Image: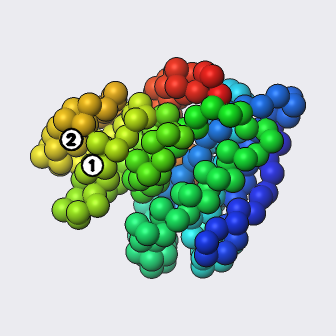
Amino acid sequence: MPIRTVQIPTADGWADAFAACPDHGERRPGVLLYTDIFGVRPELERRARELAEHGYYVLVPNLYYRHGPAPVVELPEHIGHEVRPAVVDRLMPFVEAHTTERVLRDADAYLRFLTTRPEVGDGPVATIGYCMGAALAIRTAAAHPGQVAAVAGFHPASLVTDAADSPHRLFPELTARVHLGLAEGDMTSDSAGELDQALDAAGVDHISEIYPGTVHGYTMSDTDAFNPFALQRHWDRLLPLLRRTLADS
């Protein structure tokens, strides 16, 4: 499965990214994949490649491109418990600089790039996010309801906050089907209840569930949080969602 390095023109410069797509000539549905806090790295290349093998063009941008090409900080091959706090501390300034305004400007650019690739079909696309990327996937879908038909978020972060633009307040703007796979402890019971109430009140076609026996980051095999059974459950939920929503792309 070929992986191509690409450059995405944005309002704030060029975002480095990679794309995975079957090399068979026909046009494929597009998927915009938002990374977790650790960003673009071999783990996400493997994830994109595996998803592309199911018949999708998968675009994975470097969310921190304003601060340099990926990786913006040196990452260990395995992000274990003992090094994770220090790595997160180094990344937090980039996360905090990634304001909602920047997220939305970037989403415009990413979708424009994705939907104009000659390998991508004319139909709707999907947005997928891991960790903080789940909120970005929701923001993108809410800002582009005519383009995004599916949203999936796994071990999501910061979906329910006190902010006026909290992701859960954007659900009325969604037309996409949604799957959220929470780890145990990702949210308090009150926040999880508020999340489900907001989805129901907005009439969103959704599944929101807690993956049992998991901790935050369960899909990432380069961390101590990895849970292979939960990763398989993630595929078991994600692939049918994409088949249902992107079948005509």
Estimate the x, y position of residue 225 in percent, counting from the top left. Answer: 43, 48
Q: Which tag, 1 or 2, sits closer to the chain's start?
A: 1
Q: Which residue is mark 1?
A: 168
Q: Which residue is mark 2?
A: 198
- Dot 1 falls on a residue whose secondary structure is helix
Tell me if 203 is positioned left or right of 96 in this view. Answer: left
Residue at 45%, 77% in the rendered image: 97
Above or below residue 104? Residue 89 is: below
Amino acid bearing label 1? His
Q: Nearer the viewer, residue 39 or 16?
A: 16
Q: Are marks 1 and 2 in contact (CB under 8 Å)?
A: yes
| Residue 100 in sight from this viewpoint | yes
- Dot 2 falls on a residue whose secondary structure is helix
How many residues crowd around disc 1 within 10 Å: few (fewer than 14), some, or many (20 or more)?
A: many
Amino acid bearing label 2? Ala
Q: How is the image coloured?
A: rainbow
Q: Nearer the viewer, residue 216 or 196?
A: 196
From the image, which quarter does the C terminus lie in? top right
Residue at 24%, 37% in the rendered image: 202
Q: Quadrant of residue 70?
A: bottom right
Estimate the x, y position of residue 223 in percent, counting from the top left. Answer: 51, 53
Estimate the x, y position of residue 197 in percent, counting from the top left. Answer: 17, 37
